[in-house]
Amino acid sequence: MSAGQGPSMGQLSEPAAAAAIGAACKTLYLTGTAQVAGSMAAEAARQRLSHQAYLAEVLTYECEERDNRARARAQRIKEAKFPRSKRLEDLDLAQIPDLPPATLTHLASGAWIDAGEPLVLLGNSGTGKTHLLIGLGIAAAEQGRRVRYITTAALVNELVEAADNKELSRLVGKYARLDLLCLDEVGYVKLDTHGAELLFQIITAREERASIACASNTPFSEWGQTFTDPRLAAAVVDRLTFRGHIINTGTDSYRLKTTQQTITNKSRQN
């Protein structure tokens, strides 16, 4: 053995070998292998497999597990019913000063979802609210969480229909079981008293237990116009801000600026 080399695998004790395998799997992100390497090694020994055959078994298992996880992630994203795909890595943070990279990293980790904390995104149209909402939802779904995206108007319509069919408790329970509810376009449509009260049931069912991430183009002071009853509006705001994260995406439309820049660039080329 040359100087500076570590011990060969033949010189490792069984516990040391297991620890080395675990550390290597963590470094290489071999999550499937980490869970079964020991049991597969024991089975390989019983069957008197060669080292090469054992390695083939382990690598094949890892490939199959990765395929299974990829299919599961795709299924969770499909079940979330996002209207389009928006990734966090495609978000232009320079356009959202209230969202420093460290904050985005924390939100992307999903720790706030595990803690049942709410998230509110406030800003004018075109400032990245929906992009951020969908991006965080997709990240959560890929991490194994149950996620659902829906606009406020669509959710209220769904609740009203369920109430008319005497299925409201079932629907409220369905939404309560989600790990993350992504509620878009809060404040875009004025809700009648019945619809606002039904939406409040969903919010209350998830309070301090499961996360809601919502996006709105109106400040909290104007939510009374959406929920009609000022007391109900105050109760909604209270539940969506307590222990919550509030991100202001600004007032200048990123989409408008991008369009204007594109037009300017074309004019210069001509």
Image: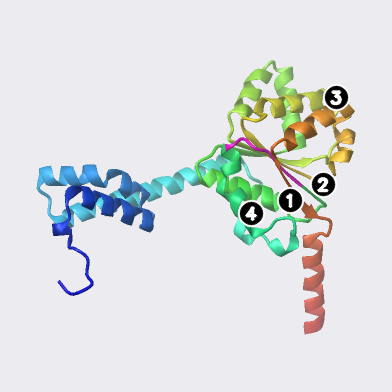
Percent coordinates x, y for residue 203 in the rendering: 71, 29
Q: Residue at x 77, y 42 (%)?
A: 185
Q: Residue 217 carries which label?
A: 2
Q: Name the residue under label 3.
A: 193
CB of mark 2 within 8 Å of CB of mark 1? yes
Q: Distance between the residues labelled 3 and 4?
A: 36 Å
Q: How far apart are marks 2 and 1 (CA)?
A: 9 Å
Q: Distance between the residues labelled 2 and 4?
A: 20 Å
Closer to us: 207 or 59: 207
Q: Which residue is drawn at 81% across and 59% down?
A: 253
2 or 3: tag closer to the N-terminus: 3
Q: Mark 4 points at which residue?
A: 104
Q: Which amino acid does label 4 sit on?
A: Leu
2 or 1: tag closer to the N-terminus: 1
1 or 3: tag closer to the N-terminus: 1
For the record, the magenta segment spans 115-121
Q: Which residue is drawn at 62% across and 41% down?
A: 81
Q: Residue at x 31, y 44 (%)?
A: 35
CB of mark 4 within 8 Å of CB of mark 1? no
The C terminus sits in image quarter? bottom right
Q: How far apart are marks 2 and 3 (CA)?
A: 21 Å
Percent coordinates x, y for residue 27 in the rendering: 37, 57
Q: Is residue 58 a member of the stretch shown in magenta? A: no
SS label for mark 1: helix
Q: Name the residue under label 1.
A: 129
